[in-house]
Amino acid sequence: MKLCDMHTHSDNSFDAKSTVDELCQAALGNGLYAIAITDHCEAEYINMGEDCEFGSFDRLIPQSVRDINSAKEKYKDRLLVLRGLELGEPIHDPAQTKHALEYADFDFILASVHNLRGYEDFYYLDYKTVDVNELLRRYFDELIETSNFEHFDSLSHLTYPLRYIVEREGYYPDLTPFQEQIDEIFKTLIKNKKALEINVSGLFKPIGRTLPDIELVRRFRELGGEYVTVGTDAHSADMVGKGIEQGIEVARAAGFTHYTIFREHKPELLVFDNYSW
């Protein structure tokens, strides 16, 4: 079975520390077939330049692309290196999102929602002072909008806020009240031939499960979902490929016969033939 990590961050992301070359070396060492370097680009903050807390995306993303292009050439006979981007909040500022998409001809784009309009990243919120149900309702509404955005390939870490709610408050919220919204997200992804990401980072955090978990991945499949990508969300070389097998197992157990990588935005299916862990 070909192992592929479709969500990694180099030191061209504000919160990551390894170079693109170090990520690729780790991928080779862990026997991966492919790696996508998907550095952060929070679209609504691009026009802040160096005044942005994340750094200037006009500087960081072109450098990421240069580093990826060098790695593609260096490892071309040993590792498939994909030119990726994690595009945060693409619906918040369409003009800046258009600017982000013009940085390069990407192979693969993850769409993410890390914060609601007018809010800080979910990482920074104090969940004792907010109405969690209202927050999640608004979050899934934004994901419905995001799933209708045209220029992405896979929707990243569907249950992102739960990573911090579990970590800070010690409970996993009941998502039953939001199932209709989640189904609408899934149906839109399916209609638009987009993928759902199985983000395995949660396996190594207090939440203890993939984002989204197997029940939601199974629901995506039941509704007709065809494409899932699997990514570690690695922010350092030591996490590259870690948990990819478990993510693939989630896809298999949810009813998929394959998982997906994207090259030049075209899906390639990796079938689970004769595979066991």
Image (tube, rainbow, N blue to C red):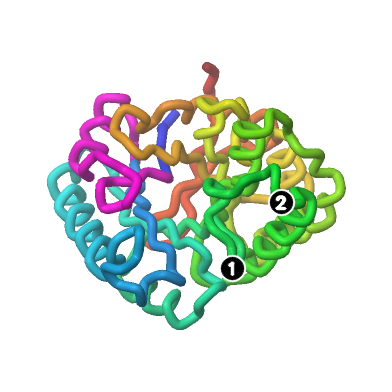
Residue at point 45% right, 62% down? Answer: 87
Quarter occupied by residue 26: top left
**Magenta-colored stretch includes residue 8:** yes
- Pointer 1 residue: 118
Q: Secondary structure at mark 2?
A: loop
Q: Taking 35 as reference, is 48 above or below it?
A: below
Query: Looking at this rendering, what residue extends furthest in the bottom direction?
Result: 95
Quarter occupied by residue 180: bottom right
Q: Taking 36 as reference, is 62 above or below it?
A: below
Q: Taking 57 as reference, is 221 above or below it?
A: above
Q: Is residue 105 left or right of residue 196?
A: left
Give the mark count.
2
Residue at point 50% right, 40% down? Answer: 230
Q: Residue 247: image x %, image y %?
A: 55, 31
Depth check, front residue: 41 or 52: 52
User: Magenta stretch?
Assistant: 7-34
